[in-house]
Amino acid sequence: MPLAILRSPQEWIARFGCDARTVVTIGNFDGVHLGHQKILRSVVERARRTNSLAAAITFDPHPFRVVRPDAAPPMIETLEQRLAHIDALGLDAALVLRFDRALASSSPEEFVQRILGDCLHACAALVGENFRFGHRQAGDVNLLRKLGAAMGFDVECITPIVVRRTVVSSTAVRSAVAAGRVTWAARLLGRPFALAGEIKSGTGTGQRFVFPTLNLSTSQELLPARGVYATEAIVEGQVYRAATNVGMRPTFDGTKLTIESHLFDFSKEITSGPLDIRFWRRLRDEQKFSGPEALREQIQCDILRARAFFTRLDAARQSTRLR
């Protein structure tokens, strides 16, 4: 069954009634990285053992947008992307709470009673070691355990994932993507960082002078550092290898940031529709060239490097399958 997405306690009760028990986790889950995945999989496993609903509570917008807007981080993914990843991990339901001043002012006790108790009827709550909740983040795992003991639900603290001595976190993912370290970001996410959006019409400069491209318009806040990347583009349900430039098009004195992808072995003329770009490897910084011909020569080198990268990737995958 697809993930049930509810937007309020009232919607939850209307959908599941007052008797359904849940195993639940709570968080922003921005990026749904390896650490999040460990918690979410643990929720599913425990829910299946106890014949309960596997549920996640998340927030929209990010709490910092309300309580500390000057410190609010750029979101790694849209809410729709987050929910799609949660769905793929096998959870039954997600409660998306609108984070506003009223919710921000709830005490830890009020939040647990109203949401975990009266609404979700939790039998277990699984959270990370640094979990905080309630007004001014006054609640922590120890308080949650005390409240859970009083209300009849267990609390399990899930240890973090560590990759090469780095604790996997949304902050670490943001730092990697913003620096263009998309290969490292993929290690932390367990998949390539991706931008999702719509194809938009470009100026036609690439088509006339260099290589044909598809231009991406995205509402995502976090973008990779300017440069050229080996990527995959998903168009009309098909995956194409590509070389993607994120930048200002300095050779043509561009003034706006663009995300342009040249798809390999792709000859369709498409001017609209969904487009997703997966970032696998950074190839080089963005540069200003003397003219279109010099840029074209460099892009030919970029394409060769991107193709070579994917050849190595395919060989590694084949080797792994044969083991």
Image: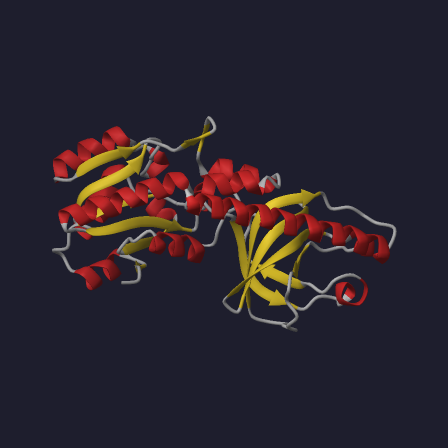
Q: Residue furthest front?
A: 322
Q: Which corner quadrant holds the C terminus? A: top left
Q: Image height check: is 266 above or below 173?
A: below
Examine the image and state in which quarter residue 17 appears. Answer: bottom left
- Which residue occupies 83% across, 49% down? 289
Residue 44 lies left or right of residue 194; in this view the side is left
Examine the image and state in which quarter residue 2 appears. Answer: bottom left
Measuring from the top left, give residue 304's x and y in whole percent. Answer: 70, 51
Total marks placed = 0
Residue 233 visible from this viewpoint = yes
Asked whether 8 or 204 is in front, the reply is 204
Residue 253 visible from this viewpoint = no
- Which residue occupies 18% across, 35% down? 147
Measuring from the top left, give residue 30's x and y in whole percent. Answer: 44, 46
Q: Residue furthest right?
A: 290
Asked whether 312 or 9 is in front, the reply is 312
- Which residue occupies 78% across, 64% down? 205
Q: Image height check: is 58 above or below 174?
A: below
Q: How is the image coloured?
A: secondary structure
Measuring from the top left, give residue 214's x and y in whole percent. Answer: 65, 64
Residue 55 lies left or right of residue 179; in this view the side is left
Measuring from the top left, give residue 209's x and y in whole percent. Answer: 81, 63
Q: Which corner quadrant holds the N terminus? A: bottom left
- Which residue occupies 71% across, 50% down? 302
